[in-house]
Image (spheres, rainbow, N blue to C red):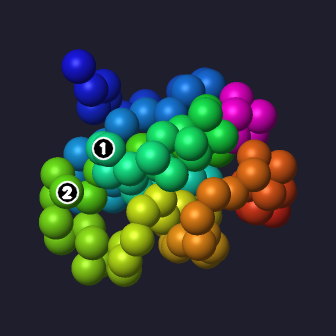
Amino acid sequence: MTDTTTPGPDADVDAPVHVDTGAELDALVEEHDVVLVDFYTKGCTLCQAVEPVIGTVARATDAVVAMCNPRTDLDLVDEYDVRSVPTLLLFADGEAVDRRADGFVEADELVDMVEQFT
């Protein structure tokens, strides 16, 4: 079962949360200062390899980390220019400020990326 509950702005989130729709993603980005979103698809081996890295970032930073399968809301593909998976998109103060869409990314690189905005 997928947890679609978006954490409140004061939540201490040490694990990735799942969002299924653009509305859920918008609410999450609006409620939190820094959000890292992992756009993934089921069955993607590269996405599976990145999943533990995403968990590490959730535990190591103050950012909220979310996972979103854009197939659950195809409008997300165009809205966030998701051309391959995994695509990692960083939001700060409601704006997309950085992205990685070039394959596997080490945890240290993502933590450094996130910490620039926390």
Instruction: Residue type at mark 2: give it.
Output: Arg
Marked residue nearer the N-terminal end (2 or 1): 1
Residue 58 visible, this orientation: no
Where residue 28 appears, as percent x and y from the top left, is: 40, 48
Please state if 84 lies on the left or on the right of 32 as rendered: left
Q: Which mark is residue 71?
A: 2
Residue 60 is inside the magenta segment: yes
**Magenta stretch bounds:** 56-61
Q: Which mark is residue 42?
A: 1
Q: Is residue 78 above or below residue 22?
A: below
Where residue 108 appears, as percent x and y from the top left, is: 83, 49
Q: Is residue 65 above or below residue 3?
A: below
Please state if 41 lies on the left or on the right of 16 as rendered: left
Residue at image x 16%, y 66%?
74
Q: Main secondary structure of the magenta part?
A: helix
Discs 2, 1 touching: Cβ within 8 Å: no
> Marks 2 and 1, Cα distance to the nearest angstrom?
10 Å
Where residue 92 appears, as percent x and y from the top left, is: 60, 64
Q: Quadrant of the N terminus?
A: top left
Name the mark nearer the viewer: 2 or 1: 1
Residue 45 is inside the magenta segment: no
Instruction: Residue type at mark 1: give it.
Output: Lys
Q: Which residue is at the far top?
A: 1
Residue at image x 18%, y 70%?
75
Q: Is residue 94 above or below residue 111?
A: below
Mark 1 Cα-neighbour bin, 10 Å: few <14, some 14–19, many ≥20: few
Q: Which mark is residue 96?
A: none
Q: Is residue 52 above or below residue 108?
A: above
Residue at image x 27%, y 26%?
2
Residue at image x 56%, y 53%?
36
Where residue 15 appears, as percent x and y from the top left, is: 55, 27
Mark 2 Cα-neighbour bin, 10 Å: few <14, some 14–19, many ≥20: some
